[in-house]
Each structure stands twice: as structure tokens, then as C-alpha cells.
């Protein structure tokens, strides 16, 4: 079973270990996870850093709004 | 300071475990980060992801050894030549000429293929900044 399919609400870390997806997990997240897992390790690291920076940026922007 | 030393015979398995752990950590971090992003940020990140994926695929194609690429294209061209060019039996000199021409064409094909790949990769490198933070109204020159 491919857990990166958009309509699947569970994620697997190991074949024998299943964990629930985050509550607001959406089809686009599943598609992006599917693509992410095909990337080389260096690209994965850089994209993680980029995603983390974007999250921080969003937090800062929401703080400014408040 | 002492480092934990894995048993020599199990070094390979130990390294594989480390790589597996790293891959799992990346996956977990990605799963945790994605739902925290806005839809606009997700679209930007998805674009970056797709470009990096294609860049990785092109890089893998470029890494195929040249003799293999040359051999494949040469065999293909010789096969096409034999199938498509009707050789008159009274002109056997045409056969080595045809095989030689196929060799030259194969060389040109492989060189052209590598050139196109290199240009495509260069385009990816210059068009996609490594970290597009998506600042609203930011100066694109910065």
C-alpha cells in the first residue's frame, strides 16, 4: 500500500509501524511527500531548511498581524 | 573524547542503519513541517521540489558512463541502418561505410545529448535560487 497516495490518512515510517497523519494533512502534502522522498539527500536537507524558514516567516508575519 | 566504535564486521550494517535513521528523520521532519505552511508557501515549495527533482534526474542521466551511452546509440543506429537501407549485393563496400557512418553519427548524438543536458542543468542552476523565502514585495535583486 502506498501511503503517499492523496486519499490515505495514515502515514507509515516502517513497514510494521503505522502512525496517524497530522490532523490537517491534505492531498497536496501527500503529493509533496511523494516527491520529497525521491530527492537526493542533499536536496532533502536544503528543502527542509527552506520549509523551516518558511514556517518561521509565517509565524513572524502572524505575530506582526497580532 | 572517545567515539563509540562499532564492531569492524558490523561496520557496513552500522552505516546503513545510520543512513536509514537519517532518511527516516528527514521524512518525519517533512511530515511535521508541511501542514504548518500556508497554501502560497506550499505552492512555492512544490515548484522548488519539482525543479530539484528534474535536476536530480538530469544529473543521473549525465552520470551514465560515456562508453555505455556510445554503445547503446551505436548499436541502435547500426540496427536502424541495416533495417532501413536496402544494400545491393553487388556493392559490399557500402557495409563498412554504413557502419562507419553509424559510428560517427553515434558520437555526434552522444556529444549533443551531453551538451543539451549540460545546458538544461545550467538553466536549472541559474533560474532557481537555492532559498526562495517568498518575502512579499522583496527586491528581486537582493
Image (cartoon, helix red, strand yellow):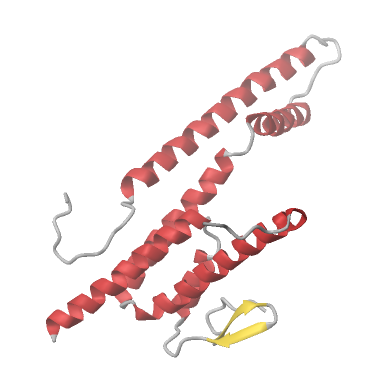
Apparent side of residue A54 relative to residue B103 in the rendered image (left or right): left
Q: In front here: B129 or A5?
A: B129
The location of residue B60, given as percent across then percent down, is 57, 45
In the figure, residue B65 lies in which quadrant?
top right
| Residue drawn where x is 16% and y is 49% of the image | B141
| Residue drawn where x is 52% and y is 45% of the image | B58
Q: How many marks?
A: 0
Q: In front here: B55 or B3?
A: B3
| Residue drawn where x is 78% and y is 23% of the image | B86
In the figure, residue B12 lies in which quadrant?
bottom right
The location of residue B119, given as percent across then percent down, is 42, 36
Q: Residue furthest front?
A: B1
| Residue B103 against residue B50 in the figure, above or below | above
Apparent side of residue A4 relative to residue B132 in the rendered image (left or right): right
| Residue drawn where x is 13% and y is 63% of the image | B137
The location of residue B72, given as percent across then percent down, is 70, 34
| Residue B30 against residue B91 in the figure, above or below | below
Apparent side of residue B100 relative to residue B62 in the rendered image (left or right): right
The location of residue B30, given as percent across then percent down, is 45, 72
In the figure, residue A29 lies in which quadrant?
bottom left
| Residue A41 against residue B28 in the figure, above or below | above
Amino acid at each position: 500500500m502506498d501511503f503517499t497516495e492523496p486519499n490515505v490518512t495514515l502515514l507509515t515510517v516502517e513497514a510494521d509501524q503505522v502512525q496517524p497523519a497530522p490532523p490537517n494533512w491534505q492531498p497536496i502534502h501527500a503529493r509533496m511527500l511523494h516527491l520529497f522522498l525521491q530527492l537526493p539527500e542533499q536536496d532533502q536537507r536544503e528543502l527542509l531548511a527552506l520549509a523551516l524558514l518558511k514556517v518561521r516567516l509565517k509565524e513572524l508575519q502572524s505575530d506582526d498581524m497580532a | 573524547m572517545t567515539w563509540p566504535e562499532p564492531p569492524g564486521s558490523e561496520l557496513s550494517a552500522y552505516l546503513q542503519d545510520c543512513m536509514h535513521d537519517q532518511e527516516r528523520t528527514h521524512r518525519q521532519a517533512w511530515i511535521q513541517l508541511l501542514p504548518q505552511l500556508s497554501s502560497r508557501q506550499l505552492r512555492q515549495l512544490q515548484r522548488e521540489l519539482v525543479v530539484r527533482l528534474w535536476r536530480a534526474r538530469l544529473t543521473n542521466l549525465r552520470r551514465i558512463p560515456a562508453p555505455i551511452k556510445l554503445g547503446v546509440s551505436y548499436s541502435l543506429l547500426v540496427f536502424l541502418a541495416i533495417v532501413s537501407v536496402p544494400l545491393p549485393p553487388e556493392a559490399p563496400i557500402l557495409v563498412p561505410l554504413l557502419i562507419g557512418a553509424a559510428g560517427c553519427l553515434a558520437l555526434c548524438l552522444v556529444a549533443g545529448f551531453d551538451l543539451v543536458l549540460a545546458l538544461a542543468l545550467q538553466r536549472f542552476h541559474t533560474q532557481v535560487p537555492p532559498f526562495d523565502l517568498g518575502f512579499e514585495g522583496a527586491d528581486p535583486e537582493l
